[in-house]
Amino acid sequence: MSLPPDSLLHLWIPTLSCILLVGLVTRVLSPQPSRWSRRTIATLLLFLLGRYLFWRVSSTLNWSDAVTGVLSLGLFAAELLVFTTSVIQWGLQFTMRDRRRQADILAADLAQGVYQPTVDIFVPTYNEPTFILRRTLIGIQALDYPSYRVYLLDDTRRPEVKALAAELGCDYISRPDNRHAKAGNLNHGIAQTDGELLVCFDADFIPTRNFLQRTVGFFQDPSIGLVQTPQSFYNADPIARNLGLENILPPEEEIFYRQIQPLRDGVGSVVCAGTSFVLRRRAIESIGGFVTESLSEDYFTAIKLSAQGHRVIYLNEKLSAGLAAENITVHINQRLRWARGTLQAFFISANPLTIPGLNFMQRLGHLEGILHWFTSLCRVYFLALPVIYSIWGIEPIATTGNELLYYMVPFYLTQFLVFAWLNDRSRSALFSDIYSLILLFPLVGVVIQTTIKPFGYRFQVTPKGLDRPSTQFNLSLAWPLILLWVFNAYSLFQGLTNPRSELGWNWIWSVYNLLMLTVTIAALIDRPGCSSGAEIETFVNLRVGDRSYRGVTTQVAEQGCICVIDSQETIGGNIQLDFPDADFQTPAIVLSHQITADGLVLQLQFQPLSLTQTRHLIALLYCQPNRWQHRQTPSELRSLYLMWRSVKINRTPVSKPALWLPQKNYLRFDRPCDPASGKSPIGKAGV
C-alpha cells in the first residue's frame, strides 16, 4: 500500500474532511437522527472501516519474529471481532424502526371501542418484599383499560403475599414447586387463566396508566405475537450513583433500549426483556409456553415465537419503571446472568443461528447480540498491549506516526464523534468504556465458563429493597483493574523516563487506559443509601390553622415530601397537604425546615395513609403518562470533566436542579427501604 504524503496538510485531509462532514450532518442538517442522516453516517463509517482494514492488512502486521507475529495477528483478530458487531449495527441503521406514530393511530381504535381484547396481567414474584409488591399492584390497578385482571404469581407460597393479593383485590396463584424458576411460574399462570392477551411485569415494575392503550392496539394485526417496551427505572443505577452522577447520566440500560432494540426491530430480531411486554396467548401456547432450557427464558421465547412466524416488535416508549440494581455487585451479577443465558444459545434448540424459521437478517441481528459478550476478551487484550510493549519492547503494529494520522485517526475519531448521536444520546463513548470495564473480568470468566460448561447454574432473582448502611469498596471486583492500573502506570513511566523511547501510540494508549481504569475503580465504591421511591416536582397547597400557602415539591416519596413555599417565616406542627394534580390530600408533620433566599424549605412526613390515599399517591409518583423521559448523555468533553470530578476524594452528587432552586440542593430524604421496618421513614436533612 502506498505511503501517505509527507506534507502535514495532506496527512490531515482525511481527518478534517470527516470532521466537517460529521459536523454538517449531525450538528447542522440533522441534529436529531433521521433515516437519511443515519444512512449517511453509517455509509461513511463503513467506508472508513474498509480503508482502515486495507491499511492494517497490507502494511501494519509485524512479522519480525514469531512472538511478535502472534501478538500482532492477535490484535488484528481482536479488532475484527469488535468490528463485526459494529458493522452489523451500522448495517441495521438502514432498516431501523420507530413505531410511536403507529401506536398513536392504533390507540384511537381502543379509545373508540373498536378493539378491546381481554388482558391478563402477570406479576411473578419469588422473594421480593411485600411493600414493593404493594406498590406494583396498586400501580397496575391504576391502568386505564376496561377489561383486565391482575394475577400475582407467587413462587414462594407466602401467606403475607396471599393476604396482600386479597386486600388489593388481585387474583393469587401459587404452585407446589419452583420447577423451571420464572419460566415455570409463568407457564403455570398461563394454564390457570384465559385472557386473549398476557402482560408480564416484574415484581418491582409499575406501568404508567396508558400502558395498555399504547400497546394493545398492535394486536389487531394477527401476525403480532409480542410487543416489547423499554425498561426504565425510578432509582439511579449504581454506577452513576457511585460516581455522584445519578442526576446526569442516563441509566446504563438506555443504550440497549434506545439504540439496539430499534435497530433489531427493523429486521425482526427484537429481544424480549422479561418484563413490560404484551403477549398473544394463542402465540405462546403454539410454542408450548416459555422456554425452560435456559436462564434467559424471555430471550429464547421470543426467538421461538419468531421462528413460528409470530412477529416480535418493539415500541420505543417508556411506559413502566422498576428498581435498578441497588449495588454494584447486584448490577454485575444481573448482567452476568444475561450473558450466561444468551451464550447458552449455542447449546439449546432455540439457538437463533440454527433454529428453522428465521431469515438471514433475523439471524444477523441475534448474532450481534451474542458476539457482544465475546468482545470482553478483546478488551483485556487491548488493555494489556501497552504493558507488553513497555516490558518486552514488542510492537504489535508496524507503523509510523504519519500512517496513524492518515489511516487510523480518521476512522477512530469519526466513530468517537458520532457514537452518542447514533445511540440517541443515551451514552457517551467515554462512559461506554467505563461500563464495559466494570463488567470486564467477571464477564470474561462467565464467557469462558459458559463455553466449557453451559448449564448447571441456578436462576437467581435480583435482590430488591436492599439497604446500604455504609460505604463499601468491592475489592474482589477491583483488584484485577488495580493490577492493570499499576502495569499501565509502569508502562507510561518507562516511556517518559527512558531517553531512548519515543512517545508514540502506545503511550497515548497507556494514558487513556489509566484514565478509564481510575474512574472504573472509583465506580466500584458503593455509596451508602437506599432506593425507596421516585422523586417528582409538583405543586402543593399547605394549610396550617387558618393560614394557607402554595408551594412546589422538590421531592415526593411514599413516606413524605420536601417542598418550598414562598415564606420567610417558620411553621411547624400539623399541616394539611393538598396535591391538586393528583386528587391527594393528607395531614403531615414538619420534620425540619430551612429558611433560604428562595423561600422556606420544609421536610414533611405524611401521616399514615389509607388505601385510597395510597392509590392516589402511587398514581402521582409512577403512573402519569409521559412520567419517564429520556435523559441526554453529556457531550464527550463534559464527560471528560465529569470523570475528573467523580474521582475527587470528596465525591458528591451532581444534583439535578430543583424547580424553584436553580443552583442549590437543600434537603434530601435518607429513607429506609421498608416502611414497615420500624425505622423512622424520613431521616435527617442536610444542606
Image (cartoon, rainbow, N blue to C red):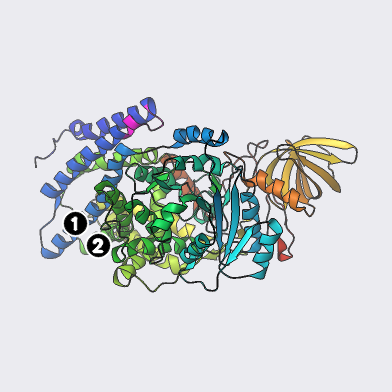
Q: Where does the N terminus fall, quadrant-wise?
A: top left
User: Which residue is rendered at x = 29% and y = 63% of the image?
Assistant: 346
Q: Dot 1 corresponds to which residue?
A: 396
Q: Which mark is residue 643?
A: none
Mark closer to the chain start, 2 or 1? 2
Mark 2, Cα crowd under 10 Å, few <14 / some 14-19 / many 20+, is some
> Between 208 and 425, which is closer to the camera in this rendering?
208
> Was residue 31 drawn as part of the magenta stretch in this picture?
yes
**x and y, in percent, of residue 187 in the image:** 48, 63
Residue 511 in view in this figure:
no
**x and y, in percent, of residue 628 in the image:** 56, 42
Q: Dot 2 corresponds to which residue?
A: 388
**x and y, in percent, of residue 574 in the image:** 86, 48
Amino acid marked by disc 1: Pro
> Between 549 and 638, which is closer to the camera in this rendering?
549
Q: Secondary structure at mark 1?
A: loop
What range is drawn magenta here?
A: 30-38
